[in-house]
Image (cartoon, rainbow, N blue to C red):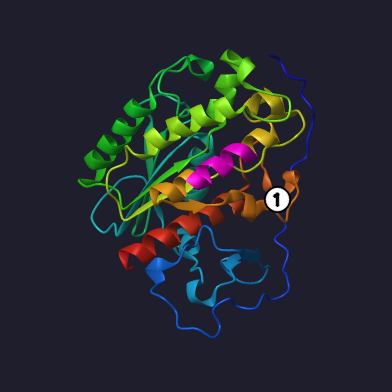
Amino acid sequence: MQARAVSVVYLIPILLSVSRVPALSSSIDCPPRNQCDFGRLPGFWREDEWPQWQVVDSCCRLEDLVGRSLRSPANFSHDDGVKASVLIFGDSVERITLHDLCKQGTYENWGHEANLFHSCRRGDLLVSRQSMIGVAPEGPYHMNYTGTPTERIENGFASHRALTGREPDAVVFSSFLWDMQRWGRFFPDKLQERGLSAETIEEWAANLEAVLERSPAAAVHAYKTTVPPLLQDCQSAEGSFEAAAMGKRAHVLALNAVSRHLAAVQGWQAVDMEALVAPFSEREYLRDLHHPAKPISMTALNLILNLAYSRLGL
C-alpha cells in the first residue's frame, strides 16, 4: 500500500532536568548490585549529569557505561580483552543502536537476511546484533524475506561463537515491528480498529515464548520493548510509510504489555522503552517513523550494560 509522503521535521530529544526525586532506598541496607532490576525501576531524566536517565533507587544508581565505552576507539573485529559481550536479536532498531555506538557515518548492514550478523567493539565491550524479522515460526514474512526465528537464532549464536569462541554474556531480544507488518500485508483480518484480538495476542505470545526458550544460558537475559510509533504518515530514510502499516500505537502497547509479562514469567529482565520516552513528544524521541533518536537508543543500551556488568561483577 502506497503511503502519502509528508514532510516532517524531527527534533533531538531535549532532556529536561527535573526536580530531585527522594531516593527509594535512602534508609535501608542495600542488596547486592547484581540484584538491581535496572530496566524496570522508575527513573527520571536530568540535564547536567551522566547518564542522563537515572533510577530513583539509591541502591541501584546507573553507571555511565555507554559513555565509558564511547571514550574507547571503535573496533569492528574481536581480539583478546573483551570483558562483556552482548548479543541482541532485533530489527533495524538494533542495527541503528550499533551504528550509534560505533558512530558509523553510513548505515551498513542494512539488509534483513537470515545470516546477517554484525558487531561493534569498544574497549572491553563487544555488542553484536543478529537480524530478526519477528517471532512467527513460518512465513510468509514481510518483504518476502526468508529465515525462521529458529534459523536466525541458531545463526546468531553460531556467529558469536565463531567470533569470540564462547557464548555471549548477555542475550537481548527486541522489537516486533515485523510481526505487525506481516499481519498488515498477509493477514489483515488479524488487525482490529482499536486493538488486537485475543486470538492474535495469544498466538503471538506463544510464538514469543518459544523464541525466548531457545536462548542458551547467559548471565543476563533481557527483553527490550518497543517505543510507540509516530501516529501520522511520514517520509523516513526507508521510504514512505503509514503508521498503520508499522503497527498502530494500541498494537505496540498491547504487545509491550505481553512481552513484559512473558519476560517476568521466564525470569528475564526487561527494558521498558515506554517509561524512557514518556516525557517527550513523538517528534522528540523518534528519528523517523519508528526508530528511537540516538539519546534514547544509547540510554536503553546503558540499561542493558548495567544489567550485564552488574551480573558479571564488573
Determine if residue 94 is in view: yes
Magenta region, residue range:
253-261
Residue 229 lies, with reference to residue 171, above or below; the image says above
What residue is shown with label 1? Answer: 12
Q: Main secondary structure of the magenta part?
A: helix
What residue appears at the point 46 percent right and 26 percent down from the top-left corner?
A: 112
Image mark count: 1
Q: Secondary structure at mark 1?
A: loop
Would you say 44 lies left or right of 93 here? Answer: right
Residue lying at the far left in this picture: please name it.
165
What residue appears at the point 43 percent right and 30 percent down from the top-left corner?
A: 207
Q: Quadrant of residue 200?
A: top right
Residue lying at the far front in this picture: please name it.
198
Would you say 180 lies left or right of 235 here? Answer: left
Determine if residue 224 is in view: no
Which quadrant, please, contains the C terminus? bottom left
Q: Quadrant of residue 258?
A: top right
Residue lying at the far bottom in this picture: please name it.
27
Nearest the eye: 126 or 254: 254
Q: Residues within 10 Å of mark 1 (few under 14, many from 20)?
A: some
Q: Amino acid at mark 1?
A: Ile
Give coordinates of residue 38: x percent, y percent: 49, 62
